[in-house]
Image (cartoon, rainbow, N blue to C red):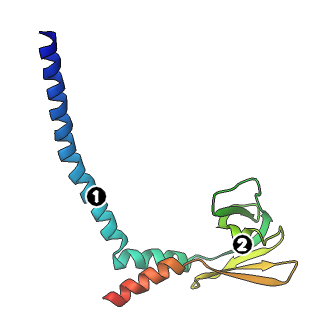
Amino acid sequence: MRTQSENELNKQERTVTKSLALVFIPIFIIFISILLIRNNSLSYLEKEYNIIREESYSGKITSLLLEKDHGRTRPIMIDNEWKKEIPFYIHEELNVGDSLYKKAESDFEYYILKNSADTIERDVNKFLRKKYFDKLNEE
């Protein structure tokens, strides 16, 4: 008698699991599809591209935050107020006292090295610009 009720419970559990899978898998697929369509729409790409393009900032590097490592990026402290993540290959060339700025209506940020009087130029909007203009040329 006991094995019969256990078998019945196992059968019900499999039925519930299959039913849940049949409901949630299509919902998940639809959700992912909507996200992919939205992320590749012209209006979304234009908005994201312009957010970065319109951003402007400047300041002096007050700390290189050497104790923190975030993989391919490293943090720096600007004017003791805000942190900015930058690529490791630029981080290695910077010193405390160097400057950083980005103008509005520009895709580039500039690092001005105090010791060598040199400037490093970084295209911060390259990926979105390419994606946006490729999509714009499609239509």
For residue 37, which quarter of the picture?
A: bottom left
Q: Nearest the camera: 108 or 47?
A: 108
Find numbered disc 2 in the image and state the secondary structure of the residue it sits on: helix
Report x, y in % for residue 123.
Answer: 60, 81
Q: Which residue is mark 2?
A: 90
Does residue 78 appear anywhere in the picture?
yes
Residue 38 falls left or right of residue 129: left
Q: Nearest the camera: 55 or 29?
A: 29
For residue 55, which quarter of the picture?
A: bottom right
Find numbered disc 1 in the image and state the secondary structure of the residue it sits on: helix
Q: Amino acid at mark 2?
A: Ile
Residue 53 falls left or right of residue 29: right
Asked if residue 2 is positioned above or below residue 112 in the image, the reply reads: above
Give the foreground label among 1 and 2. Answer: 2
| Mark 2 burial class by Cα count in 10 Å: few <14, some 14-19, many 20+ | some
Q: Amino acid at mark 1?
A: Phe
Cα distance between the residues tagged 1 and 2: 38 Å
Work out which quarter of the rendered image holds the N terminus and state it. top left
